Amino acid sequence: MNDGDTSQSNGAGAAALLAAGAGCLALGVFALAGDALPWANKLFSIWKPSGALSGVSLAATIVWLGAWFVAARRWSGREVRLAPIVCLAFALLVGGLFLTFPPFMDLLQGK
Amino acid sequence: MELTYRDVVTVLHGMGFGALFMLAFSGAIGVIYATAIGSGSWPATRRHERIFRFYLISMAALAWLTVLSGTYLVYPWYRAKPPPGVIDLAAYPRALLISNPMTAGWHDLGMEWKEHIAWITPIIMTMVAYVFINYGPKLALHRSMRRAVLGFTAAAFLATGVAGAFGAMLNKVAPVRGGADVLAIRYAHHE
């Protein structure tokens, strides 16, 4: 929409971008939960040898694919305002990157 | 010249999948940037387009193979708990690292960061491959999307750099070793 005359709608790409951001944030949130909450750590330990990492990564993958499916159904074949979606996708990505950083995790937990 | 089974799997995870993926980054960023050349569309032939699609799909596949082999093959060996009474912790890298305050940071910061941030990369690279397959040369017409894809690719590069650098360091400080011996190369010793 902001890019002038485009011969293919931007909806499918916007859905993929936003879902990737959502997946990254979900990874960070689940990693923090697994670190901070004993019950979440137990819940995420779906494969004992890998511990909580197995469930954290699986849950984040499910959130990413689920968000992609929902967003693609709504936006595929449509023109959407890309700027706010890109801003949101980057905010989610940066949030995810921070939440995977152990000193930031510790700060949030007051350690 | 022998390696242990765990050495072989760790090398496959880090050098076979991870490093190959890292090497491919410069090519991916270069071609994504190349879509910015020209005012209209990406000046590539259909063959070039097919090759680049294959290239990005291979990168996404390598990223998935790296995190899956790391999470389900190498990491369980790394975090294995030593049985009570074991004094030599060489076969238990996590326990070895946290047993000494001088090395505990390698686990608390290095491994804790690496194990999570690495998973961002396959998510992003799958998205990047999808966007390129879906739009192809027409991505040149969607400038905001192209810039966003480049930004996400840079974030994946950062994530891979962190995971790769800490992986290499951790394997120096507390290597994951053990299992059956595997003959890597036969080479006669000469006095």
Image (spheres, rainbow, N blue to C red):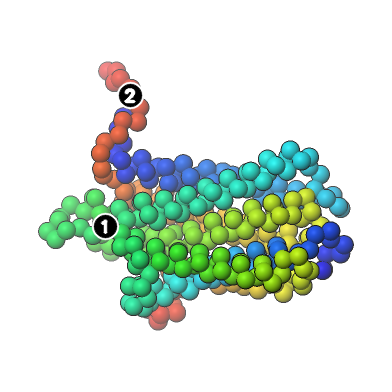
Residue under label 1, please give it.
B80
Task: List the single residue furthest toward the top.
Answer: B191
Residue A105 placed where, x, y %? Answer: 44, 74
**Label 1–label 2 contact, CB within 8 A:** no
Horizontally, residue B147 falls left or right of residue B38, namely left
* Chain ID of residue with mark 2: B
Q: How far across and down, in percent of the image, does residue A106 sit?
A: 41, 75
Helix, strand, or loop for circle 1?
loop
- Which amino acid, mark 2? Arg
**Callout 1 crowding tier (Cα within 10 Å): few <14, some 14–19, many ≥20:** some
Residue displayed at 72% across by 74% down = A84
Residue A87: percent from left, percent from top: 68, 72
Task: Name the foreground residue: B69 vs B39.
Answer: B69
Name the kind of residue labelled 1 in the image.
Answer: Ala
| Residue plotted at (70% across, 62% down) | A13
Q: Identify the image quadrant of residue A12.
A: bottom right
